[in-house]
Image: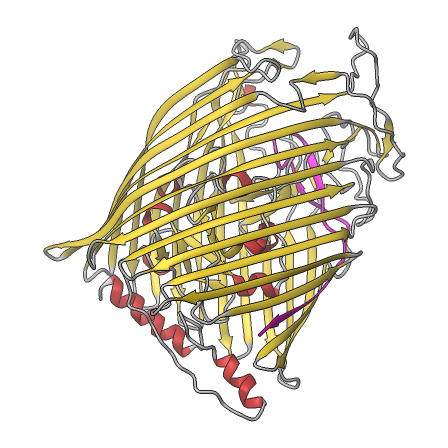
């Protein structure tokens, strides 16, 4: 059985489960029509399966996931055909869960922990225990396009999660994260059926949004498509004295001429945040245990906190089929970002909650430009099939940063403005102080950094025994260049450039038509950190130097199953990432290591009619090795929980027509704040419940959704040490969401 025949067989299985593929009309629509006294004709159509890499995997039974996604140079792939762990969350899930951001979507996977950045309003993630920042999320397979702090879920038609190191498949993003996995956002496209959608929503305690989503196809063969998404929201949030304002505009144009495909995406996203809660800094904390969690909606930051995050982005992509077996592709995209943040976060001193309030005024501007070009195809050499991929990708980014803050150093000749005192449990109203220490001009910041990443990948997937045994071999040559400049004068302060080749080996065996066994070795690359300036009371000899290219390694074995209506898998993995240590001569280098060993399981689909499951679990052993002087050898890496479970589901209630009950439980184990493992964060559990009702409206539907997140209003520390400082981030309180969507 060839890969194409296997893909067709699995499509037929999913048709039998009532899954929408292409212009298929779901069986659920027929049921609704039948209940209204008539039964529409259901037409099932399927497009020809093209060369692997061009066609997105179809939606799986239940509509919540697609069991596959875009794997960088390998293109769109069905998970059962590749020796890697990948899953995609659909726009149907995004809409039904009323997800606002990409972080809300990724909460569905136990391998992902969602947190915030240090001292700013952003989402950050840990995949398999390693950081991924929004800077390093790709758009249609291209890095350097999307907003860098918060990505609205309305941008995505699918959120695709690749678990594991991915330098070979995706290249190296400018931000240098993604050791444990990567995320790709697929753009929204017009569908064969016209899209006419109006929506409005309410989120406690007074946030209201509304949106328009319109899509059309044109031409004799519907070869031209246009999709326009507009959304606007503002109001109070569930955190005390906090407000948000969000604006999104997105235009997607595409042309599908059979052998030629073109697309263009243009977007603008702006988020303004006033007085919202920031993470808690424990850098000077003297307590012997983690402080008690304040009330779930408590706000302990000054009311003058404000952040404006604005990004305009665009991307062009083209594909050409030279014949049935070979396809060339190219893409070009980039963004321009303007951010201004005045932040006052709390640095805690003791377990009683005493601390001080910092103040930092930051101006951030950036531009990025990314490109890729490649060729993929297939051929046979005797009994062995080949799926070949050759691709080049590059990302260039430039950032301009300046910041100001009040002088708090008594030894300075400047006017002294000590950090005001506050208390975590009884916050003090703190006035904004004058900024008299400046690094650059916040009105017109100088360029402080430029990063150039480019590389070439080559791979061959060899098929044996009628493609039941697939061996993937490949390598990527990667060049990384980092230039840093002084904020005050824009003068080059240091430069680092290096290159490296990373290999990939993957083996997949289709034990049966429904079970695949696999193993892989794949690596990640990133520019190293800068050496710290001090080591206790000693000065580091190579302070400020970039410490080279960091190469992380992953080994993984696993099994996947797909029975048409239910699928999932299990995986064992080990990832080793070098860590900075300081030797006896006070010289910093990558001599330590964080080794994460883990076990993952997943289950998804619609095993019974009207019952949909989406569940996963991860167990992790995040060990520190070869630390400075061996002090923390054998300890757990901070910010990585020992386990995480996610159990979600939907049930179409049999006694009430068109009414669906939804629920999700998230359980996260204990984690440490510090490398010494002195400060331990307790496990926590979050319960989400909801109802969805579909009401026929003329020839369309009016869909009501009501959800309660964190039903028990549990106050908990959701994550620790999300960035390079000892920090805690408090989880969101009980939140009510109500929305109405009219499809007509």
Residue 717 magenta-highlighted:
yes
Please state which of residues 335 and 94 is positioned toward the viewer in this rendering: 335
**Place of residue 548 in the rendered image (x, y in percent of width and height, measured from the top left):** 43, 21
Residue furthest toward the front?
Answer: 219
Magenta span of residues: 715-744
The N terminus sits in image quarter: bottom left
**Place of residue 583 in the rendered image (x, y in percent of width and height, measured from the top left):** 52, 14
Please state which of residues 262 and 325 is positioned toward the viewer in this rendering: 262
Residue 297 magenta-highlighted:
no
Please state which of residues 613 and 596 is positioned toward the viewer in this rendering: 613
Residue furthest toward the bottom?
Answer: 37
Is there any visible trace of residue 131 in the rendered image?
A: no
Q: Is residue 321 left or right of residue 717?
A: left
**Place of residue 591 in the rendered image (x, y in percent of width and height, measured from the top left):** 47, 22
Q: Which residue is drawn at 82% across and 35% down?
A: 302
Q: Which residue is drawn at 49% across and 74% down?
A: 607
In the depicted structure, whether residue 459 falls above or below residue 526 = below
């Amino acid at each position: 059985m060839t890969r194409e025949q296997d893909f067709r067989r699995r499509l037929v299985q999913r048709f039998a489960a009532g899954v929408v593929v292409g212009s298929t009309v779901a069986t659920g629509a027929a049921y609704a029509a039948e209940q209204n006294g008539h039964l529409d004709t259901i037409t099932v159509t399927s497009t020809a399966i093209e060369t692997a890499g061009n066609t997105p995997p179809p939606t799986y039974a239940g509509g919540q996931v697609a069991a596959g996604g875009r794997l960088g140079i390998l293109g769109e792939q069905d998970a059962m055909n590749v020796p890697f762990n990948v899953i995609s969350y659909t726009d149907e899930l995004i809409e039904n869960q009323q997800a606002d951001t990409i972080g809300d979507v990724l909460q569905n996977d136990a391998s992902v922990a969602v947190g915030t950045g240090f001292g700013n309003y952003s989402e950050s993630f840990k995949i398999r225990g390693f950081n991924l920042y929004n800077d390093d999320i790709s758009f249609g397979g291209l890095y350097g396009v999307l907003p860098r702090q918060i990505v609205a879920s309305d941008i995505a038609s699918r959120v695709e999660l690749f678990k594991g190191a991915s330098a070979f498949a995706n290249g190296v993003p400018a931000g240098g994260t993604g050791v444990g996995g990567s995320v790709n956002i697929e753009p929204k496209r017009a569908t064969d059926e016209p899209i006419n959608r109006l929506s409005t929503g309410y989120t406690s305690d007074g946030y209201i949004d509304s949106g328009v989503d319109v899509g059309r196809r044109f031409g004799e063969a519907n070869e031209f498509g246009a999709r326009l998404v507009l959304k606007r929201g503002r109001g109070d949030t569930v955190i005390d004295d906090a407000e948000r304002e969000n604006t999104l505009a997105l235009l997607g144009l595409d042309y599908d001429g059979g052998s030629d495909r073109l697309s263009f995406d243009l977007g603008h996203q702006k988020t303004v945040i006033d007085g919202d809660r920031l993470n808690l800094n424990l850098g000077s904390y003297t307590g012997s245990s983690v402080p008690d969690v304040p009330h779930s909606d408590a706000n302990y930051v000054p009311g003058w906190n404000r952040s404006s995050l604005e990004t305009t982005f665009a991307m062009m992509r083209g594909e050409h089929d030279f014949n049935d077996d070979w396809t060339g592709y190219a893409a070009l995209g980039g963004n321009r970002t303007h951010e201004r943040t005045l932040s006052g976060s709390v640095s805690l001193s003791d377990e009683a909650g005493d601390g001080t309030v910092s103040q930092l005024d930051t101006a951030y501007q950036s531009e990025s430009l990314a490109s890729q070009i490649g060729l993929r195809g297939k051929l046979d050499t005797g009994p062995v099939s080949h799926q070949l991929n050759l691709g080049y990708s590059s990302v260039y980014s430039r950032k301009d940063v300046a910041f100001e803050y009040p002088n708090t150093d008594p030894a300075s000749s400047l006017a002294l403005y000590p950090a005001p005192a506050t208390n975590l449990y009884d916050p003090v109203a703190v006035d904004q102080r004058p900024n008299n220490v400046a690094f650059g001009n916040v009105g017109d910041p100088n360029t402080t950094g430029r990063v150039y990443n480019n590389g070439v990948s080559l791979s061959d997937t060899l098929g044996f025994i009628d493609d039941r045994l697939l061996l993937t071999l490949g390598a990527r040559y990667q060049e990384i260049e980092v230039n840093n400049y002084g904020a005050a004068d824009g003068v080059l302060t240091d430069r680092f450039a290096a290159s490296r080749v990373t290999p990939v080996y993957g083996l997949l065996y289709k034990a049966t038509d429904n079970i695949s066994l696999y193993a892989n070795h794949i690596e990640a690359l990133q520019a190293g950190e800068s050496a710290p300036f001090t080591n206790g009371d000693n000065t580091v000899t190579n302070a400020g130097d970039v410490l080279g290219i960091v190469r992380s390694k992953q080994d993984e074995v696993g099994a996947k199953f797909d029975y048409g209506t239910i699928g999932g898998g299990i995986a064992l993995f080990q990832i080793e990432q070098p860590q900075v240590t300081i030797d006896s001569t006070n010289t910093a280098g990558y001599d330590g290591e964080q080794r994460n060993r883990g076990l993952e399981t997943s289950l998804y689909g619609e095993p019974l009619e009207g019952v949909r499951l989406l569940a996963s679990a991860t167990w992790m052993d995040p060990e520190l090795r070869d630390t400075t002087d061996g002090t923390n050898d054998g300890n757990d890496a901070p910010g990585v929980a020992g386990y995480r479970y996610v159990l979600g589901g939907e049930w179409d209630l049999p006694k009430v027509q068109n009414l669906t009950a939804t629920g999700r439980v998230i359980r996260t184990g204990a984690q440490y704040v510090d490398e010494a493992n002195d400060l331990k964060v307790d496990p926590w559990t979050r319960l989400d419940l909801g109802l969805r009702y579909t009401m026929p409206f003329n020839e369309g539907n009016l869909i009501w959704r009501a959800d309660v997140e964190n039903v028990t209003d549990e106050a908990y520390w959701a994550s620790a040490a999300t960035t390079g400082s000892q920090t805690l981030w408090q989880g969101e309180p009980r939140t009510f969401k109500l929305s109405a969507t009219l499809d007509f």
